Image: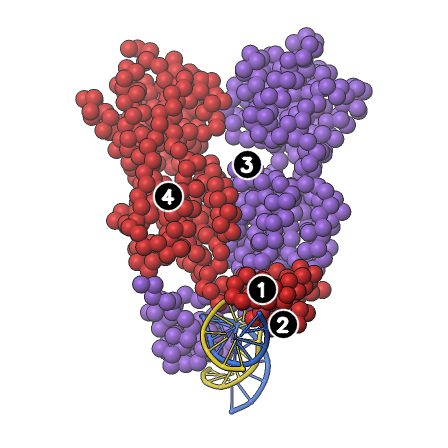
Chain colours: A red, B purple, C blue, D yellow
Amino acid sequence: MKPKAVTLKDVAAAANVSRATAARALNGYGYVGGDAAERVRTVARELGYRGNRIAQALRQGELPLIGFVPGDILNPFFSQIAHDLDMELRGSRHNLLIAASQEDPEQERQVIDSLRALALRGLIIAPATSDPNPQLAAMLEEGYPLVLIDRVPEGLDCDQITVDNREGARNAVDYLIRSGHRRIALIHDGSRIGTARERLAGYSEALESRGIAADPALIAESPSTVSHAIDATIRLFHRQDPPTALFTVDSLMTQGAMLAFRSLGLSMPHDVSLVGFDDFDMATFSDPQITVVSQPIKKIGPLAVEMIMARIQGSRAPARHVQFPTQLTVRGSVSRPRSA
Amino acid sequence: MKPKAVTLKDVAAAANVSRATAARALNGYGYVGGDAAERVRTVARELGYRGNRIAQALRQGELPLIGFVPGDILNPFFSQIAHDLDMELRGSRHNLLIAASQEDPEQERQVIDSLRALALRGLIIAPATSDPNPQLAAMLEEGYPLVLIDRVPEGLDCDQITVDNREGARNAVDYLIRSGHRRIALIHDGSRIGTARERLAGYSEALESRGIAADPALIAESPSTVSHAIDATIRLFHRQDPPTALFTVDSLMTQGAMLAFRSLGLSMPHDVSLVGFDDFDMATFSDPQITVVSQPIKKIGPLAVEMIMARIQGSRAPARHVQFPTQLTVRGSVSRPRSA
DNA sequence: GTGAAAGCGCTAACAG
DNA sequence: CTGTTAGCGCTTTCAC
C-alpha cells in the first residue's frame, strides 16, 4: 500500500556507486566523477528520489524550519507578518512553523518548549508580556537564534524589532489636543502587553505636556476584542460629562469603538472624534474614514528574517534593536469638539 | 558557547540505567521498576533533558507536524482556518507548518514537495486550481494523509470539506431577482479557482430559472484583490445601461465594489444593490451593512483536523466528502431597483 | 575519485 | 523488570 520512499541507498544501488558518492553527486560537494555524478542524478530523478530531511537533520542537527509565535494569527497585524515571513523564508529554503501563544504567557511557554524539541533553526516571537522572561533569557544565553518582534520582555538584550509606541500615541493624542479636545478618553487592554503600556504612557505624556490633567475616569481597560471594546466605549460615553474624543490602542478596539458610536447614535467627527493605533482595512471603508497611527508593518517580516538568518549563520554581533517610527495617518474622524 | 543538548544517554548514565530503561521511564511504556523510573525522571528534570524529536522521527518515520497549504494566509478566510487548525492540533500534540501557495499552481507544487521532504504526518490543502492534479493523486495513491478544503481538483476521491458554492450563489442572485433586479452584474476571478467557477454557475442558473437572459457584458473577470475589483466595478457601471445590482464572488471583491460605488457616487441600496459571497468583518461596519452569502467557516478547521487524524491513525475508510450549506445573511445592501 | 565505516539520538525487538 | 543490540537515512572523515 504505502510504497516506502526511495532512499539514498536505492539510488546508489541503481547507479552502481556507493551511498557516499551518491550523496556527493546529489548535494554537489567534494569530488565526484562528472560521469558518475550524471548517472546518479538521472537515476535519482527516475526513481523520484526525495531526500529525507529528517535524517539530514539528525546528522546536521537542525531542520530548515523557523518557528513563529504570534499573539494570535487572527489579528491582521500578525497574519501580515506571517505572510511576509513565509514569503521571505522561502527564498532561503526554509519553512515556517506557526504556533500562537493566544497572548497567554503559560501557553507561550509551552509552545516554545514544544517548538524547541523540534530542533528548529530559530524562533521569531512576539512575547505575550513585557515581564522578564527566564525562558527566553536562557535560550539567548545558549546562543539560540531568537528575534523578538512588536514587544520585548524587560531586561533582554536580544535582536528585536519594535515600533515607537510611545511617540505614536503621543502624536495621536497631541493631534486631538491641537484640534481643541480636552476630554480625551483612552481604551487600552491592561498593562499586560507591553505595547499597550507604552501607548498609555504616550497618552499621558501628551496630556501632561499640554498641561491637561489626566482624568482617570476617562481611561478604560478592556480585553482586546471588538465586543469588549464596544462595551467599554459605551460605558465611557454614558457618563454625565462624556469625553469629546477617544484614542484606542489597537485596531480591534478601534473597530469596537466605531460600532459603539453607531449604536449610541454618535456620529464622527461631528459628535465625537476618534484616533486609533494601528491601521486596518476597514479604516478606509467607513464614513468617515478613520485617522490612525500607522506602523510600517511590511518592513517587520523581511527584517526579522534577515536578523534570524544572520544569527543562524553564526553571527555573534551585538543584539540589534530596531525601532521603527510611526506615522499619523490623518483621515476624517477628527474635528474640533462640538461644544468648543 | 552552545552547550550541546542533554541526550538520553546522559540521563541514562546519570541515573545508572541503560538508555532503553531511561526511554521507557520517560515515555511511559513497557515495564519499568517504579524505583528506577522515579530516579530517571528526577535526573532528567535536573539535567533539563528535552527529548530530540528529530531522532524519534527518524526512528518512527514522522514528525508530529501537519502541513497547511492555504491560498494566501492574508485572506481572512484562511487565517481563520489556520487559527482553528493551530488550536485544534495542539490538543493532539501536533504543530502546524504553513506554506501558502499564493494561488499559484507551480508554487503549490514546490511547496508540497518541500513539505513532503519534511516527513510530515499529513497535509491539509486548499488546491489553487480545480484542474486534475497528478501530484495530489499520487500522494493519495500512496495513502498519504491528505485533506482538501474549500476547493477540489477534478477526479480526486479524497477527504474533503467544501461549501455548496453553486447553491449559495444561486440563492444570492435569486434574492436579487426577487427584489426586482433584472440587470445583475457579476465579478469573478476567472475560472482558475474552482469555487469561483461554481459560484458563476450558480449565478447563471438563477438567472436562467427565472427566465432572464444572461448578458455577457455584465460579467467581469478580475484578479481577486481589492484594487482590481474597484476597476472592474467601475468598468461595469460606466456603461450606457448600467446594471442595477452586483454579485461578487469573494470578500475582497465585495470590498472593492463598495469602494468603487463610493467613488462613483452610487449609494447603496438606493442606486445599486450588492450581495457578496463570503462574510467579512467590514460587512457590518459599512453603511448600509452588506448582505452576504456566509459559510460556516469555523467548522472547517476542526473537521479537517478530525479527518486528518483519522487517516494518520490508519483509517482506510472511503473518502469523506463533506459539503456545508451556505446561508444568505440579509443585511441592508439590497432594495428594489430605483427605476422599477 | 570513490568506498567503507562510523555514528547523529532514539526506539524496539529480543534476551536475560 | 532491564540491558544489549540493531538500525532509521544520511553525511562525513579516512583510507584506498
Question: Is C5 displayed left or right of A34 in the figure?
Answer: left
Residue A261 vs residue A87, the one in the foreground: A87
Q: Amino acid at mark 4?
A: Ile
Q: Specify whether residue B31 is in view.
A: yes
Residue B245 vs residue B284, the one in the foreground: B245
In the rendered image, residues at marks 1 and 2 fall on the same chain: yes
Single out the mark in the foreground, 3 or 4. 4
Q: Earlier in the sequence, mark 4 or mark 1?
A: 1
Mark on residue B75? 3
Per the image, the residue denoted by label 2 is A17
Q: Residue at x 39, y 74 (%)?
A: B11
Question: Is A50 displayed left or right of A201 in the figure?
Answer: right
Disc 1 versus disc 2: distance between alpha carbons? 10 Å
Per the image, the residue denoted by label 4 is A149
Disc 2 versus disc 3: distance between alpha carbons? 49 Å
Image position, residue A338 (x, y; %)? 33, 11
* Mark 2 vs 3: CB contact within 8 A: no
Question: Is D4 displayed left or right of B241 in the figure?
Answer: left
Mark on residue A25? 1
* Mark 1 vs 2: CB contact within 8 A: yes
Mark on residue B288? none
Image position, residue B184 (x, y; %)? 70, 19
